[in-house]
Image (tube, grey):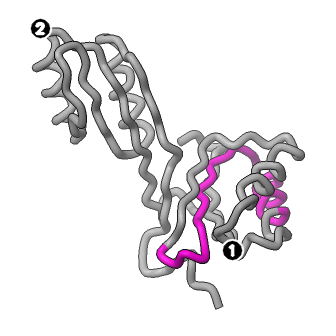
């Protein structure tokens, strides 16, 4: 992850319209979202958003303050990179031939990925990990021909016992 990128972990109410209000906040201030992941937490009343964006310290503080003002936002935290577990998810469909099939499958194993669909002319692979690992696999797969690719936004949790959802 580049130096000017930061990770926001945001706990929000789990109901319609919350994502639109938060993305609207970024849009109105001309801040770009590099990665976004939203899903229900262990408590179905709340969703957790992991947002990766770019900016300096001033922008980080402005975004944090503006998010905290929104009614549906329950907690906002900037996750320090060195204290955070970050993972992305990649599905990539690759062209294969009889000659290339074994090389591709061997490489999937090296990347600790999994073949999730297998056909005579293509293979679909699932890989999770940090963005540099996924980027390296994409570069490898591009030599064979990527038919289709889908990459999920990053998931991130702080290391240790503390929890974002520790709401009072």
Side of 33 relative to 81 (left or right):
right
Q: Which mark is residue 159?
A: none
For mark 1, give the secondary structure: strand
Q: Decide which of 20, 52 is in the foreground and name it.
A: 20
Residue at 85% x, 70% y is 69
Q: Decide which of 58, 34 is in the foreground and name it.
A: 34
Q: Distance from label 2 to label 1 (Cα)? A: 53 Å
Residue at 83% x, 66% y is 65
Residue 5 point in image, percent of width and height? 64, 45
Furthest residue toward right: 28
Indicate the quadrant where residue 64 lies: bottom right
- Tell whether position 49 is magenta: yes
- Circle 1 packing at 10 Å, graded few (<14), some (14-19), many (20+), is some
Mark 2 or mark 1: which comes first in sequence? 1
Furthest residue toward bottom: 168
Residue that mark 2 sits on = 99
- Tell whether position 29 is magenta: no
Residue at 60% x, 44% y is 35
Side of 131 relative to 133 (left or right):
right
Indicate the quadrant where residue 150 lies: top left
Q: Which residues are magenta?
A: 42-66
Residue that mark 1 sits on = 75
């Amino acid at each position: 992850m580049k130096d000017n990128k930061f990770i926001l972990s945001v706990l929000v109410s789990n109901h319609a319209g919350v994502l639109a209000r938060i993305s609207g906040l970024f849009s109105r201030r001309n801040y770009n979202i590099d990665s976004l992941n939203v899903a229900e937490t262990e408590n179905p009343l709340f969703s957790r958003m992991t947002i990766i964006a770019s900016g300096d310290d001033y922008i980080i503080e402005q975004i944090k303050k503006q998010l905290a003002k929104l009614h549906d936002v329950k907690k906002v935290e900037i996750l320090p990179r060195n204290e955070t577990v970050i993972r992305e998810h990649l599905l990539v469909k690759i062209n294969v031939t009889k000659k290339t099939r074994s090389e591709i499958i061997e490489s999937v194993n090296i990347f600790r990925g999994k073949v999730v669909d297998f056909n005579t002319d293509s293979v679909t692979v699932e890989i999770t990990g940090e963005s540099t690992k996924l980027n390296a696999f994409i570069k490898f797969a591009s030599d064979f021909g990527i038919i289709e690719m889908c990459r999920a936004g990053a998931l991130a949790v702080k290391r240790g016992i503390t929890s974002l959802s520790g709401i009072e």
